[in-house]
Amino acid sequence: MDAQPIVPAISPLTIRPRIFLEAASEMMDSDDWPYREVRVEMRSRGGETGVFRLFGANHPDSLQEMAAGTLDIAILNPSALLTMAYKGTGAFHQPIPVSTIAMIPHHDQLGFAVTEASGLQSLDQIREQRYPLRVSVRGSLDACTTLLVDVVLKAHGFSLEDIVSWGGHVSYDQPMPDDPSRIGRVQNKELDAIFDEGIMVWGHLVHDAGMHFLPIDEQHLTALEAQGFRRATISKRLYPPLSMDVPAVDFSGWPIFARREASDLLIRQFCEALEARKQQIPWNLGMGSHEQPPMPLDHMCRDTPVTPIDVPFHPAAERFWREKGYL
């Protein structure tokens, strides 16, 4: 008879939080449950010191909370936003003390698509013509996207607010760009542009919708690199309907990050937990929960095009990953 695995006994101290964590995990898998931001607070027993706070949502507010010292670990995308926070550039007026734990692989670009009917061939022309663009950007649940759209526009001398002041309209839409409520409105001549990421789901649709991506020129790419973006290409090889490769900015990487002053104890325990549960943690977009490959921690600690790491590791995370041979 095969030996059964030894399961640690559940004590009263663990059963209560585990019930809520397991129930919340199941609720997140339900299409009928719209509440997707998860905050976890772990505190010590009795009068012992120590409160650790984790936030599982893609929201720029997490960076401000870290600046205030009220959040310890969070996740967002893309990597460029964390880099800007670390440097105090782009969307941030001063550096925020953040550090990297690991980088979930993700390959993407930020695309600025306009209709052929608009006649626009560059972002600069929107400013020069004070074009009253009717543009769709991502809604409030993905505030990081619209924040970075504005960083790119401001590098070209204007903003979403300026577009409105010129008689245009900004539509904040939560569905991805391939949704009929977005690209369908372009086809119905209700929109002139879509500015968004997630190119893998809509890059192949742009041509047939009567649109093209605006390229970012060398001068602006250099300026945006200085702010924290990496340069990228929306590739004709990947999206054959495109007429050419399009120079763009990168939107890759989902950083798991920490407050720089977060305790070594917390960060090491968190890394150990990722290692212990890497077979069970869903991480790969588009795959069902039961189809997920193991979380590739050995790749999540290396700087690659799909895991762009420009913010130093938290010292405790770096030590742990080196012990595992991942660095």
Image (cartoon, rainbow, N blue to C red):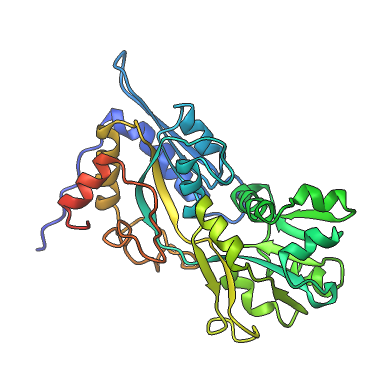
238 over 159 or under it: above or below? below
311 over 105 or under it: above or below? above
Number of numbered labels in the structure image: 0
In the figure, residue 314 lies in which quadrant? Answer: top left
User: How far across and how far down the image is residue 166, in percent?
Assistant: 88, 53
User: How far across and how far down the image is residue 200, in percent?
Assistant: 56, 72
241 over 46 or under it: above or below? below
Q: Quadrant of the N terminus?
A: bottom left
Residue 173 visible from this viewpoint: yes
Q: What residue is shown at x 71% (from left), y 57% (from top)? A: 137
Q: Quadrant of the C terminus?
A: bottom left
Q: Of residues 188 and 63, which is closer to you in this image?
A: 63
Q: What residue is shown at x 56% (from left), y 40% (from top)? A: 92
Q: Of residues 254 and 12, which is closer to you in this image?
A: 254
Q: What residue is shown at x 40% (from left), y 48% (from top)? A: 256
In the figure, residue 319 lies in which quadrant? Answer: top left
In the image: residue 73, left or right of residue 180: left
User: How far across and how far down the image is residue 99, in percent?
Assistant: 37, 42
Residue 181 visible from this viewpoint: no
Q: Of residues 215 and 241, which is closer to you in this image?
A: 215
